[in-house]
Amino acid sequence: MLRSLITRLLSSVAVFLLIAVGLFALVRLAPGDPVEMMVPPDVLGEDREAYTAAVRDRLGLDQPIAVQFVRWFGALMSGDLGYSYTNGRPVGELLADRLGPTVLLMGSALLIGLIIAVPAGVIAAVRRNTVADYAISTVSVIAIAVPSFFLGMLAIYVFAVKLHWLPSSGMHSVGKDGLGDLILHMIMPVGLLALAISASFIRYVRSGVLEELGKDYVRTIIAKGGTPARALRHALRNSLMSLITVLAMTIPVTLSGAVVLEQIFAWPGMGQLAIYALTNRDYPILIGFGLYIAVLVLVCNLIADLSYSFIDPRVRTAR
C-alpha cells in the first residue's frame, strides 16, 4: 500500500511538471500581445514605442522565450507563480483570494448533487422501465442537454427580474454580510450547478446499481432469505467503485461549469478571475489558474485511487 502511494505521488509530480511546461508553451504561443493591452490609448507614435519597450523590459518579455521559461520555471520550483501583468499583485495571492468563493460554490453544488443523484439513481434502477424511471431519466437528459449559461440567464430573468425573489449577482448585497444574505445569493448558482452534477451522476448510479443487481451474489442473498433492502445495500456499495471514478473526473469538470456561472452571476471566484486574465492576456494568472486545475485533477485521481482500497478489499489485497 505504501509503495503504491509513493509510486503514485512520484508519477503525479512528473505529470505536474509536464503540464507546467505545456501550459507555459501554450499560453506564450496564443495570439495577442499583453503589452499592447497595457498601453494607454492616448500614447501614440514614438512615445508608444518607447512605452511598449519600457513595459517589455520591466516584465522581462524582451528576453528570448528560453530565458523567460528558465526564469519562470525556477520561480515555480520555489512556489512563486509570478506577478500579474495588469495590477502587479502576486498571482498566488490573487488566486488564494478567489479560492474560497469557488470552493464554496463547487462544494455546495457537489454535496447537493450527490444527495439528489444517489437516491434518484437507485429509484430509477429499482423501478426500471416504470414511470419513475422514465421521469428521472428524462429530467436528467434535459438537464445535461440545456447549456448552463441559458439556464442561468433564464433563472435571473424569472427569479430576479420578474419575481424579485432572489438577488442576481455577487455574494452579498450592499451593506449586508450575514449568512442569510449569502444563502440567498447562493441559491441560483449553486442550484444550477448541482442540477448539472446530479443529472450526470444519476445515469452512472442507475447503470451501476442495475449491473450489480443482475449479479449472482444478489440472487444468492435473496435465495437465502435476505430482504430486497439488504441485497440493494450490497449492490449500492459495490457500485460505488464506478461512482468514485466518475466523481474524481467530475470535480475538475465542475470547475469549468463554475467558470460560466461565476461570470453570469458575478460570483467573485477563480473562474471570474480567469476570464479577466484571458481578456487582458495576463499570462501569469492564466498559467497559475491552469496549474491549480492540474493540481485539482491529480489530487482527485489520487484520492479516488486510494478510496478503492477502503471500499473494495480485493483491491487492498492485490496491492
Image: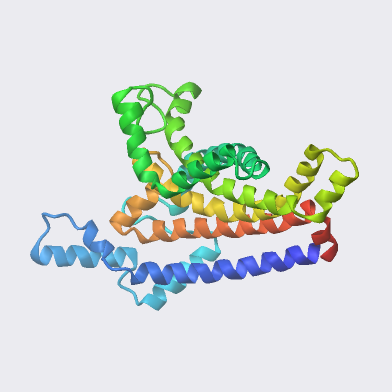
Colour style of the rendered protein structure: rainbow
Q: On the rendered structure, is 143 left or right of 247? A: left
Image quadrant for the C terminus? bottom right
Q: Residue 198: percent from the left, percent from the top?
A: 54, 43
Q: Residue 13: percent from the left, percent from the top?
A: 62, 66
Q: Residue 88: percent from the left, percent from the top?
A: 35, 52
Count numbered badges in the picture.
0
Give me the residue at 78% from left, 56% from top: 309
Q: On the rendered structure, is 165 left or right of 183? A: left
Q: Residue 9: percent from the left, percent from the top?
A: 68, 64
| Above or below 65: residue 246 | above
Q: Residue furthest left?
A: 45
Q: Residue furthest front?
A: 130
Res 279 quadrant in image: bottom left
Give me the residue at 38% from left, 33% from top: 170
Res 11 quadrant in image: bottom right
Whether residue 32 appears in this view of the structure is: yes
Whether residue 94 appears in this view of the structure is: no
> In front: 249, or 102?
249
Q: On the rendered structure, is 35 left or right of 108? A: left
| Above or below 162: residue 34 | below
Q: On the rendered structure, is 130 left or right of 58? A: right
> In front: 75, or 232?
232
